[in-house]
Image (spheres, grey):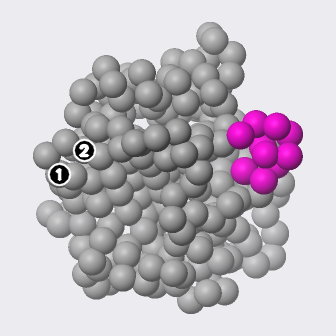
Amino acid sequence: MTEIRKSRATESFYGRRKGQQLRGRKARMMEELLPELRLNPEGEQPAIISACFQKPFQRYQLEIGFGGGEHLTRQSIHNPDTAYIGVEPFINGMAKMLGAIVDHDLKNIRLYDDDATQLLDWLPENSLDQIDLLYPDPWPKFRHWKRRFVSQKNLSRFQRALKPGGIFRFASDIDTYVNWTLQHVDKHGQFQWLAQCADDWCNPWDGWIRTRYEAKAIREGRPPCYLEFQLKS
């Protein structure tokens, strides 16, 4: 089942929210564990981002659209001093992530299962060290390009939420979306592209976790691109 719904008066959330019906353990975790880990942008805005977690962390990162959670899980395991916020509206992906949290006893993750723009507007200013937008829906048809998450308005949201010098990372196997992102970032003017040579955006970053989606893209002849931008101080 696919559901597309309006999320705000001036913006729209487009995308799949439901897939196969959840049963057993997955259904129980969605009912019992997600409410414990879910951030609530409808509630009072936290004064500091550490208030979203049970303890302070050295770094705070946001991953928008974590899919099945492979990257977010591995990052959380290998960086226990970093706090992660994962956003994924697709309930089957969220259920997989909850399973990984239980299986690995992860204590440095909070989750949100709706429109990422609501969360970005709610988080404290200058609170994030990094934002990852990895393989977002490319909306390949020209008439749908306006639905792409990278936009002037959302880049301003990134600017607001990131600390000075914070990092925005983007990965995609769709060349039109890579070009789109470069053009929008250049137009926005508040982020510096950190690439020094072609290898900087043809090869993944240190510690990169290859997902099943990326492996499929490579098999099908769509080489990924990895873009890294730094918020100007």
From the viewer's perspective, is residue 228 above or below residue 72? above
Q: Nearer the viewer, residue 154 or 202?
A: 202
The label number, if any, that marks residue 164 in the structure image: 1
User: Which quarter of the figure has residue 176?
Assistant: top right
Q: Which residue is mark 2?
A: 231
Residue 129 rendering spot, x and y as whole percentages? 29, 60
* Relative side of 50 to 110, left or right: left
Among the two numbered marks 2 and 1 on one chain, the one whose residue lies closer to the N terminus: 1
In the rendered structure, does residue 78 fall within the stretch colored magenta?
no
Is residue 6 in sight in this rendering?
no
Local crowd size for mark 1, using a 10 Å CA cut-off: few (<14), some (14–19), many (≥20): some
Q: In x, y percent, where is residue 109?
A: 46, 73
Name the amino acid type tagged 2.
Leu
Provide residue 221's location: percent of width, then percent of height.
82, 37
Label ID, residue 65: none
Whether the residues at callouts 2 and 1 have beta carbons within 8 Å, the answer is yes
Instruction: Kindly state the secondary structure of the residue where label 1 is placed.
Output: strand
Q: CA distance from mark 2 to mark 1?
A: 6 Å
Q: Which residues are magenta?
A: 214-223
- Type of the residue with mark 1: Pro
Instruction: Look at 52% across and 39% down and name the residue there.
Output: 198
Above or below residue 57? Residue 2 is above
Q: Residue at x 25, y 44 (%)?
A: 231
Judge left or right: residue 134 versus residue 139: left
* x, y percent for residue 146: 51, 18
